[in-house]
Amino acid sequence: MDDLLHALLPLRNGAEPVWRGERLTLRLLIPSQTLPVLPRLARAMLDMPPRGEFSGRSLHFTGFQDGIDGSPLQPGELTPHTVAPLSAERLAERIEAVRRGGCRRLTFTTPLRLTLPAGEKKAADGVRRFCDADFFRQGNALRHLLGHIRLLPPVVCGAEMRVESVRLHWADMRYSRERAVALGGLVGEICLTGRPDAETARRLVLGEYLGAGKNARFGLGFWRLTAEEGGYGETVGHR
């Protein structure tokens, strides 16, 4: 799995029961060279032993689809030559809409575990190791976030925007019934004002797909970008 996945993002959160007939979606972020392994992953999902509520005995695999345009993908034909990669070029229309827009909302749909800038960490006991809600009320918060988008080189951008309001809280997510381990991070939303430059807009959109911070393989650190009333339209976020 370490070689296969950059991130496994659940597009359904919470502890509500899964009902018969409900469709579940997982978004995979993978290196292109591992595309031929996906059919084996699909078979493994169907062959999972009946441990807990989430198993192959209660799930029927329906197929793969492109994460940007939703087009169906044939499991036997998943190669770097047949699947279009995630790129800023494929998202150019949405990136341009963000660049032209005004106020927008950034909603963290899974806990954000973003380490603080080096000079702001306290003791070695882990106190204030990760960004909290108060951090996002500081002037450099957005620049710190956008400079740490996964798989992108660190840059300084976002200076032309500011955080207008913060509605964030810390939430823990347990990933194992057998181990009493919780991964915590920020969930909620921040509202931004200002018109981003090209690099800021690009990172705001790509961050929906790449995420930021730690524990990507557990689906942490992803957000949705939507327009505020009076901005550039309705939803800018992905499907």
Image: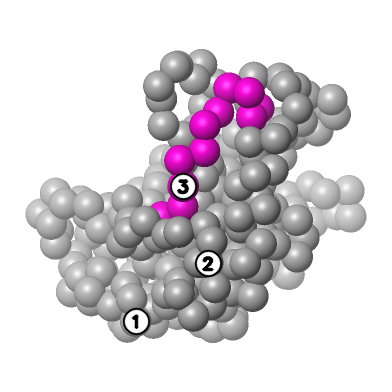
Q: What residue is shown at x 42% (from left), y 59% (from top)?
A: 73
The three-letter amino acid code for the residue at tag 1 is Glu
Q: What separation in Å lies between label 2 and label 1 (alpha carbons)?
A: 21 Å
Q: What separation in Å lies between label 2 and label 3 (alpha carbons)?
A: 12 Å
- Measured as percent of width and height from the top left, residue 175 is found at 72, 34
The three-letter amino acid code for the residue at tag 3 is Gly
Q: What residue is shown at x 39% (from left), y 67% (from top)?
A: 204
Q: What mark, if any, has residue 63 been given in the picture? A: 3
* Residue 185 forms part of the magenta stretch: no
Q: Residue furthest front?
A: 76
Please identify the quarter of the rendering in which residue 36 is found. Answer: bottom right
Please, what secondary structure does the residue beneath circle 2 have? loop
**Is 51 rendered above or below residue 132?**
above
Please, what secondary structure does the residue beneath circle 1 have? loop
**Is 59 rendered above or below residue 197?**
above
Q: Nearer the viewer, residue 53 or 88?
A: 53
In the image: residue 199, left or right of residue 47: left
The magenta span reads 55-65
Q: Nearer the viewer, residue 110 or 82?
A: 82
Query: Mark 1 sits on what residue?
Result: 89
Query: Mark 2 sits on what residue?
Result: 78
Q: Residue furthest right?
A: 124
